[in-house]
Image (spheres, rainbow, N blue to C red):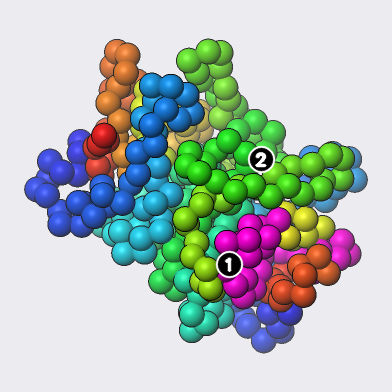
């Protein structure tokens, strides 16, 4: 489900602030750049407010954000809804005891890690990133949370690339996005 | 300046207590100050952001620049709290548009920090955020990036101020504000 763009007057302001950079990081990719959104404090605030309004009464106790752009959106959401923030990081960055989840890239593999003890069983969790493409990273994030017994309530992203069908890789969990980019 | 020097704000103890020290990370001899445990304590995390917002909201700051990646955890909330833009300062190759780059020294070799061209206008008053300052090398590179576009760096702000290992902190010409001192 995505926010009904026709209804909320904030949506156009948010969408218009996202910049598309062609051929980054490689030819053929139209990169969705959220840094221009962060330069507009009203549009950035509206982005956070839309997520907060959706989640504040859903008893979410954990917001997990994916390194690095999930660190930009996740903490303000966590602070506003009274949840903890848990960073999900590339290998070797988290200093304590961790669990790791491998996932497949277009060429090769990558790995996402979470601190042991950050999340308790049965906690209700949200996973946040700036964008969902193929869904591989979000799926790895969900797996980390479920491996420690948390319940992933929803995945939340600013932008979805629906043509890449990432929504179908979320093991049946719902996805909420603000902007779709075809 | 340490926040503690201003009179001990009652929120600071819980913030300090919530930060975990992990010995010998990333290598032997380093006592790593881990702010992820602070992020698990909602009140202490909120108080951390509030302390920075209270300090900066009437200083005419229009830009909060945050250093990848842990500066991204604190910077945006502060920017939202004071009505400023947030600018991510990133490792090479991450920012998609036109960038400027600034090298800085590591213990062995150098690294680079990048910022988007056009993010900053001349004369804008800025603060730079990271979770921790050690030698100040990364913060110094961040200052240079912003000053290359004639921004005015008002202050550098970190949650934890770590004692300098060798020589003086490179930030001696810019004010540095930290909330808590390291503990072992």
| Closer to the camera in the image, B95 or A174 | A174
**Residue closest to the eye, B174 or A72:** A72
Which x, y percent locates residue B102? Answer: 55, 24
Task: Give the position of the C terminus of chain A as an image quadrant.
Answer: bottom right
Look at mark 1 in the image and give the residue it sits on: A149
Subunit bearing disc 1: A
**Residue position for label 2:** B95
Q: Is A140 left or right of B18, judged from the image as shown?
A: right
Is residue A146 in the magenta section?
yes
Q: In the displayed structure, does residue A13 sit left or right of residue A97?
A: right
Q: Disc 2 to disc 1, how far (Cα)?
A: 35 Å
Name which residue lies at 43% across and 49% down.
B36
**Viewer-nearest residue: B118 or A57:** A57
Given this view, does label 2 or label 1 mark the residue nearer the observer? 1
- Is B76 above or below relative to B125? below
Start-end of magenta stretch: A140-167
């Amino acid at each position: 489900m995505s926010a009904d763009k026709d209804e909320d007057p904030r949506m156009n302001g948010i969408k218009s602030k996202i910049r598309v950079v062609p051929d980054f990081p490689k030819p053929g990719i139209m990169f969705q750049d959220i840094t221009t959104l962060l330069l507009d404090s009203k549009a950035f605030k509206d982005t956070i407010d839309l997520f907060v309004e959706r989640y504040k009464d859903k008893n979410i106790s954990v917001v997990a954000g994916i390194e690095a752009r999930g660190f930009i959106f996740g903490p303000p959401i966590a602070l506003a809804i009274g949840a903890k923030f848990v960073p999900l990081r590339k290998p070797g960055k988290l200093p304590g005891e961790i669990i790791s989840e491998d996932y497949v890239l277009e060429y090769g593999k990558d790995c996402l890690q979470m601190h042991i003890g950050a999340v308790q069983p049965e906690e209700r969790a949200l996973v946040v990133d700036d964008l969902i493409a193929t869904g591989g990273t979000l799926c790895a994030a969900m797996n980390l949370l479920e491996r420690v017994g948390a319940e992933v309530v929803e995945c939340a992203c600013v932008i979805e690339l629906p043509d890449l069908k990432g929504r179908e890789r979320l093991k049946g969990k719902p996805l909420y996005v603000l902007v779709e980019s075809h | 300046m340490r926040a503690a020097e201003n009179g001990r704000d009652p929120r600071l103890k819980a913030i300090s207590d919530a930060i975990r020290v992990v010995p010998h990370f990333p290598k032997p001899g380093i006592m790593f100050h881990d702010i992820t445990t602070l992020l698990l304590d909602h009140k202490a995390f909120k108080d951390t952001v509030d302390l920075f917002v209270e300090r900066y909201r009437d200083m005419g700051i229009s830009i909060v620049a945050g250093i990848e990646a842990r500066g991204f955890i604190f910077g945006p909330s502060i920017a939202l709290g004071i009505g400023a833009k947030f600018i991510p300062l990133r490792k090479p190759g991450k920012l998609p548009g036109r960038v400027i780059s600034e090298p800085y020294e590591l213990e062995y070799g150098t690294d680079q920090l990048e910022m988007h061209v056009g993010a900053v206008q001349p004369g804008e008053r800025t603060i730079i955020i990271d979770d921790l300052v050690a030698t100040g090398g990364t913060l110094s590179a961040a200052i240079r990036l912003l000053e290359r576009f004639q921004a005015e760096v008002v202050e550098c702000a970190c949650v934890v101020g770590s004692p300098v290992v060798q020589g003086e902190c490179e930030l001696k010409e810019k004010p540095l504000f930290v909330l808590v001192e390291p503990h072992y």
